[in-house]
Image: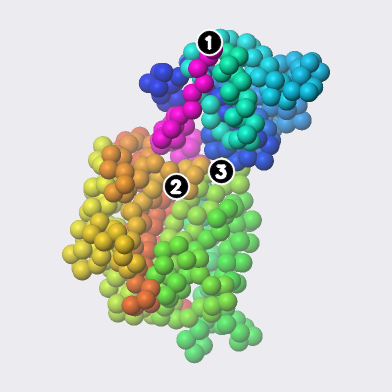
């Protein structure tokens, strides 16, 4: 969480942090530090042990002020005169501007970490010149898990409240979608509209998109609403032209975010309309067995990989391939058990064999999503997913409020 940044700066021997944001860039570190403020080009400065400060263009000063941070504008750093002095040297102008900013913040030496997103060519030139002009300052570019990724691993109470809020609205949309589907009738094995034409996946998605606007959410990566064979391919979004049919598994994976805060929710339900074939019901029971087994054993300090292994044990007991025993298989249990969630749809911690050292901590928010997939041999897929968080007492609580019924009847 943000309160960890000063500790992390000491551990990483960083005296100051700088975030760069180009005018049209989506910079997660900047969104994190500013509360997703609506900004064009901007800079953020944080010295060790001191609050962060935001520097922006004059036209965006009111939007920047909504962040609650100390705000200044570029003109405060003699930008007008610098433009005259360096009118034929854009890179020299940038270096001179950074010299003035560093002087204003009393950054005269030490290790300064640079983050964010700007034009790579310009950034390369400016930082090279800055290094040459300021040998007293060491420009640091972190690799691997950077300081903001590490801080975002756990959420503070305000972030948890944002996640709870978006979870309520996302769950309401999924419930309304179910009501929308069951508001139609079934005829000859298909869901049909009043005019007798089939209800299609595309029409269901359009309904969901309308609900997003109603609930002040957005879905930057759209959604998964996949039926039958497509439900057996984990990231198939489904075919808009396909009519909803009874007796086929439908995977509805919904991962919207709040339009203002940027925090995500992630949930999946598997539905069979009218009835479910025996093999789908059997697989669903096994997925729920895995889901419930993990929910019953979460504890702070445990390694996330232990829960992935627990689910693999259960599925392998029933004869399914898993990512642990056959990483190349296209059928069975094909993915990790979950991932962190926040301003990114995928964050730490990771419940994967590729992250054997990730552990559960108070303040984690993450998904639990066991699934089984048989697109070619059986023509179905099953997945159940809730988003969860660990509260201050170490208890795991769900952010998802939606029943887990497989068979949907009228």
Residue 344 in the image: state x and y as whole percent.
49, 44
Residue 142 in the image: state x and y as whole percent.
45, 29
Report how far apart the C-alphas of labels 3 and 2 lie in the structure: 13 Å
Vertical placement of residue 300 versus 339, above or below: above
Q: Residue at coordinates 47% horizontally, 66% vertically from top-left?
A: 236
Looking at the rendered structure, the secondary structure element under dot 3 is: loop
The crowd level at tag 1 (other Cα within 10 Å; few <14, some 14-19, many 20+) is few
The crowd level at tag 3 (other Cα within 10 Å; few <14, some 14-19, many 20+) is many
In terms of image quadrants, where is residue 108?
A: top right
Q: Locate the N terminus by quadrant.
A: top left
Q: Which numbered marker is on residue 346? A: 2
The residue segment tinted magenta is 135-164
- Side (left or right) of 270 relative to 135: left
Mark 2 or mark 1, which is nearer to you?
Answer: 1
**Residue assigned mark 3:** 262
Mark 1 or mark 3, which is nearer to you?
Answer: 1
Residue 401 in the image: state x and y as whole percent.
43, 55
Looking at the rendered structure, the secondary structure element under dot 2 is: loop
Q: Residue at coordinates 53% horizontally, 66% vertically from top-left?
A: 177
User: Of all residues shown, which one is farthest toward the bottom?
Assistant: 188
Mark 3 or mark 2, which is nearer to you?
Answer: 2
């Amino acid at each position: 969480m943000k309160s960890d940044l000063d500790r992390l700066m000491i551990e990483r021997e960083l005296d100051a942090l700088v975030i760069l944001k180009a005018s049209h860039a989506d910079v997660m570190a900047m969104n994190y530090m500013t509360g997703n403020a609506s900004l064009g080009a901007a800079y953020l400065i944080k010295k060790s042990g001191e609050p962060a400060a935001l520097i922006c263009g004059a036209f965006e000063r009111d939007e920047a002020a909504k962040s609650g941070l100390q705000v200044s504008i570029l003109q405060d750093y003699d930008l007008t005169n610098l433009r005259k002095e360096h009118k034929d040297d854009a890179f020299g102008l940038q270096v001179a501007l950074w010299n003035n900013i560093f002087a204003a913040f009393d950054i005269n030496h030490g290790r300064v970490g640079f983050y964010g997103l700007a034009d790579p060519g310009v950034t390369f030139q400016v930082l090279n010149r800055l290094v040459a002009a300021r040998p007293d300052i060491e420009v640091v570019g972190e690799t691997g898990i950077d300081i903001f990724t590490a801080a975002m691993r756990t959420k503070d109470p305000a972030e948890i409240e944002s996640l709870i809020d978006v979870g309520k609205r996302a769950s309401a949309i999924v419930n309304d979608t179910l009501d929308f589907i069951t508001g139609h009738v079934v005829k000859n094995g298909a869901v049909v509209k009043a005019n007798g034409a089939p209800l299609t996946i595309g029409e269901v998605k359009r309904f969901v998109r309308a609900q997003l606007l109603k609930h002040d959410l957005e879905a930057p990566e759209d959604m998964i609403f996949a039926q039958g064979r497509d439900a057996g391919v984990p990231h198939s979004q489904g075919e808009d032209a396909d009519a909803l049919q009874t007796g086929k598994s439908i995977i509805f994976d919904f991962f919207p975010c709040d339009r203002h805060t940027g925090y995500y929710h992630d949930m999946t339900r598997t539905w069979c309309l009218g009835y479910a074939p025996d093999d789908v019901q059997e697989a669903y029971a096994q997925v729920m067995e895995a889901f419930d087994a993990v929910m019953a054993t979460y504890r702070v300090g445990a390694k996330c990989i232990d829960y992935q292994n627990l689910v693999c044990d259960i599925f392998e007991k029933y004869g399914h391939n898993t990512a642990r025993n056959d990483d190349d298989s296209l059928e069975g249990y094909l993915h990790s058990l979950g991932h962190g969630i926040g301003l990114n749809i995928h964050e730490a911690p990771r419940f994967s064999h590729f992250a054997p050292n990730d552990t559960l901590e108070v303040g984690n928010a993450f998904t639990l999503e066991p699934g089984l997939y048989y697109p070619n041999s059986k023509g179905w897929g099953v997945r159940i997913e809730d988003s969860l968080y660990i509260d201050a007492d170490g208890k795991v609580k769900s952010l998802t409020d939606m029943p887990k019924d497989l068979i949907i009847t009228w």
